[in-house]
């Protein structure tokens, strides 16, 4: 069966709602699923008691109090009851399609990393899990949003025990640790399987108050840059677009040569994908968000003077 592990933010306000939603959804995947939560943030012990999951309050942190990924993965591997593990961010709702896809993958491939794109969704209230159609409701809500995110965002990692050894001192709460995990699987090597066609992982939208620099700080502050440096200064960073295999809608695992080129081409049809792939050009032309905002202000001021 499966052990899911993660580490939360404090269980306060909106974070309390979405984290409890996510963790509850994990416990409903199968009666034998084990869930482990690492950390002693406010409300964590209470949430673990309420949700009847395993709590590991001790986590090794750096000088800023940020949690080390290697400790969490090493400890989870030591204490997990099951041979298959899944690390998921605490805002990700997982549903029965993950269990079905994973069962089919495991029949076909012995060792692997399975990842997939997320669906950004506005959820502000507790999910009514008592309702027999709660998954249907969540899916409908997700489909009303912006659709699946681009493959640069990796929010869950389904893998066999023993895949990750000697993880560098990356920290969670900043970018690039997720991309290193994908690179490591490719370097091992094992198949990296994109299951986005068969799994809808719902990311509950939230703010970035935990980062001093907001969402920008998560990929640009000192800690993020340290993560990037530990990832070979970018050389050891990959994402879902670098998958070697995909799952078909029938659940078959298929090798997909040149997947990165294909998925990058598909991304050009989305607003966010176009922005990401044109970043180098916009930067060279000075078409950054701050520049555009200043231009709007100047135009507005000019109009007022008239």
Image (cartoon, grey):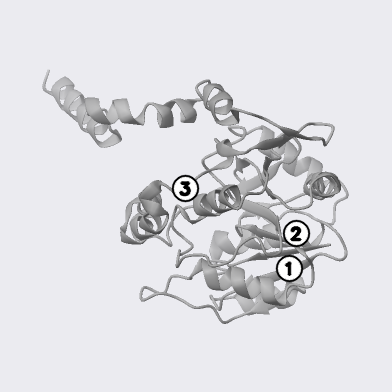
Label 2: element kind: helix
Label 3 Cα neighbours within 10 Å, binned few <14 / some 14-19 / many ≥20:
many
Residue that protrudes farthest toward the top in the picture: 306
Quadrant in the rendering for residue 224:
bottom left
Q: Are marks 1 and 2 in contact (CB under 8 Å)?
A: yes
Where residue 248 appears, as percent x and y from the top left, is 78, 31
> What separation in Å lies between label 1 and label 3 (alpha carbons)?
28 Å
Is 140 rendered above or below residue 123? Answer: above
Specify which label sits upstream in the sequence, 2 or 3. 2
Label 1 Cα neighbours within 10 Å, binned few <14 / some 14-19 / many ≥20:
many
> What separation in Å lies between label 1 and label 2 (alpha carbons)?
7 Å
Specify which label sits upstream in the sequence, 1 or 3. 1
Q: Residue at x 53, y 69 (%)?
A: 70
Residue under label 3, please give it: 237
Q: Residue at x 75, y 57 (%)?
A: 25
Q: Residue at x 63, y 61 (%)?
A: 19
Residue under label 2, please give it: 26
């Amino acid at each position: 069966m499966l052990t899911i592990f993660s580490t939360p933010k404090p269980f306060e306000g909106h974070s309390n709602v979405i984290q409890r939603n996510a963790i509850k959804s994990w416990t409903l995947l199968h009666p034998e699923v084990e869930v482990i939560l690492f950390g002693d943030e406010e409300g964590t012990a209470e949430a673990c008691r309420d949700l009847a999951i395993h709590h590991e309050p001790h986590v090794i942190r750096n000088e800023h109090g940020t949690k080390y990924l290697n400790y969490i993965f090493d400890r989870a591997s030591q204490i997990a009851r099951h041979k298959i593990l899944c690390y998921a961010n605490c805002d990700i709702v997982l549903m029965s399609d993950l269990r079905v896809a994973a069962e089919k993958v495991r029949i076909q491939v012995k060792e692997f990393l399975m990842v997939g794109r997320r669906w950004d969704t506005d959820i502000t209230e507790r999910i009514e899990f008592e309702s027999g159609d709660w998954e249907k409701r969540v899916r409908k809500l997700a489909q009303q949003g912006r659709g699946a995110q681009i493959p640069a965002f990796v929010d869950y990692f389904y893998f066999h025990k023993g895949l990750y050894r000697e993880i560098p001192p990356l920290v969670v709460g900043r970018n690039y640790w997720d991309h290193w995990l994908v690179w490591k699987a490719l370097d091992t090597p094992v198949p990296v399987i994109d299951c986005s066609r068969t799994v809808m992982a719902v990311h509950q939208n939230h703010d970035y108050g935990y980062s001093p620099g907001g969402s920008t700080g998560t990929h640009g502050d000192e800690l993020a840059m340290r993560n990037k440096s530990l990832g070979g200064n970018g050389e050891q960073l990959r994402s879902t677009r670098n998958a070697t295999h995909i799952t078909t809608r029938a659940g078959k695992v298929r090798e997909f040569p040149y997947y990165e080129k294909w998925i990058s081409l598909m991304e050009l049809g989305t607003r966010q994908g176009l922005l990401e792939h044109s970043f180098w050009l916009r930067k060279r032309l000075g078409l950054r968000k701050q520049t555009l905002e200043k231009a709007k202000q100047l135009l507005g001021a000019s109009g007022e003077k008239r």
